[in-house]
Image (tube, rainbow, N blue to C red):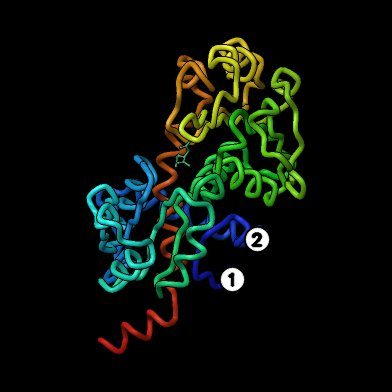
């Protein structure tokens, strides 16, 4: 794949890059299944986890990925940091960089934050989610999971359902699946779609029942109530009835169709509780594969950066 310094958006990757990363992920799944799931690939490297927004799986997943490659991690918990004393984003980033880090995983509520931050540090940046914009490692974990079950994604039909407007996962996955040749359909009420979808490689429907029998992937999005400004849907119950994956709708899916969700789930809103536990729901696999995919991303970014190699041999 082409040399990559940062991973900020799925737009940074072309189809060959994605294939390369998913193939590398396959090897790291194998490492993760070993009795001692640890290899020395990133020994001596430090990965900073800089999270300005809540996270369970992404943060733990990156920490686990770094550990399995023998990198050190440096955690930064904004709730306990000098950000609370008014320190600016730039000063915070420069302070963390001064500790000597090779990679920074950044989650920030501002769309575009990682593009600014990369100006203030020599470290490679991985976007761990910026506002409503992008979440590329989630998309890679999802592509990997879908590919493992469905094989080549070319020509597959993927419905991304629910709160598209507020979801960085929807944006990253729409780009990712369509780069792999899949057909992406956003399924949402008008109030939960962005004002414009011009240039997006997707089609749109407001009726899940219209597509449910024809899709290979039913990808449910979390209803992002914390980003809603006023009521976007009449009631959550009504949303569930119209756009949720109820048991009755799940029965109409093709036998080999996958049910996916990035987590955290709102059971009873975008997905019925019982549906999330069906055999064709691969939601916990998405989490498990997320670790291996992040190992691949970290390795590609900092395992082979020439300036780092030179820096290391100068020390040796
Ligand atoms: C997502 C996120 O934070 O963007 N969660 C995740 O990383 N798995 C999705 C969400 O919060 O809805």
Q: Label 2, label 1: how many angstroms apart (C-alpha)?
A: 9 Å
Q: Quadrant of residue 147?
A: top right
Q: Is residue 49 visible?
A: yes
Q: Quadrant of residue 100?
A: bottom left
Query: On the rendered structure, is 131 left or right of 159?
Result: left
Q: Which percent across, then down, holds residue 88?
A: 35, 62
Query: On the rendered structure, is 305 left or right of 177?
Result: left
Residue that lies at the very extreme toward the left in this rendered image: 80
* Dot 2 and dot 1 residues touching (CB under 8 Å): yes
Residue at point 66%, 22% (across, down): 254
Badge 1 element:
loop
First reached walking from the N terminus: tag 2 or tag 1: 1
Q: Quadrant of residue 17?
A: bottom right
The tag on residue 14 is: 2
Q: Is residue 260 visible?
A: no
Where the C terminus falls, by quadrant? bottom left
Q: Which is nearer the eye, 38 or 141?
A: 141
List the residue tagged with mark 1.
2
Q: Which is nearer the eye, 43 or 209?
A: 209
Residue at point 45%, 23% (across, down): 266
Query: On the rendered structure, is 122 left or right of 242?
Result: left
Q: Is residue 169 above or below residue 6?
A: above
Query: On the rendered structure, is 100 left or right of 289?
Result: left
Residue at point 51%, 26% (across, down): 281
Q: Which percent across, then down, holds residue 156?
A: 71, 38
């Amino acid at each position: 794949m082409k040399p990559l310094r940062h991973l900020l958006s799925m737009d940074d990757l072309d189809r060959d890059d994605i294939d390369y990363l998913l193939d590398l992920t396959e090897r790291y799944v194998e490492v993760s299944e070993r009795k001692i799931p640890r290899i020395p690939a990133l020994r001596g490297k430090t990965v900073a986890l800089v999270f300005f927004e809540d996270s369970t799986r992404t943060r733990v997943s990156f920490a686990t990925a770094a550990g399995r490659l023998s990198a050190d991690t440096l955690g930064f918990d904004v709730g306990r940091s000098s950000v609370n004393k008014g320190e600016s984003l730039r000063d915070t980033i420069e302070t963390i960089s001064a500790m000597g880090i090779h990679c920074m995983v950044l989650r920030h509520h501002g769309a575009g934050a990682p593009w600014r931050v990369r100006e203030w540090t020599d470290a490679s940046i991985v976007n761990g989610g910026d506002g409503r914009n992008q979440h590329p490692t989630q998309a890679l974990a999802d592509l990997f999971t879908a590919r493992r079950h469905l094989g080549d994604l070319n020509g597959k039909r993927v419905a991304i359902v629910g709160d598209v407007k507020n979801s960085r996962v929807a944006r990253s996955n729409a780009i990712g699946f369509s780069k792999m040749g899949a057909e992406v359909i956003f399924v949402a009420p008008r109030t939960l779609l962005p004002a414009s979808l011009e240039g997006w490689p997707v089609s749109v429907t407001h009726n899940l029942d219209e597509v449910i029998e024809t899709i290979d992937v039913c990808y449910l999005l979390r209803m992002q109530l914390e980003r809603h400004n006023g009521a976007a849907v009449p009631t959550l119950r009504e949303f569930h009835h119209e756009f949720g994956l109820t048991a009755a709708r799940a029965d109409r899916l093709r036998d080999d169709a996958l049910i996916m969700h990035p987590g955290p789930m709102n059971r009873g809103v975008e997905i019925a509780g019982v549906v999330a536990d069906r055999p064709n729901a691969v939601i916990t696999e998405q989490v498990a594969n997320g670790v291996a995919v992040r190992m691949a991303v970290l390795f590609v970014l900092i395992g082979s950066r020439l300036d780092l190699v030179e820096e290391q041999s100068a020390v040796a």
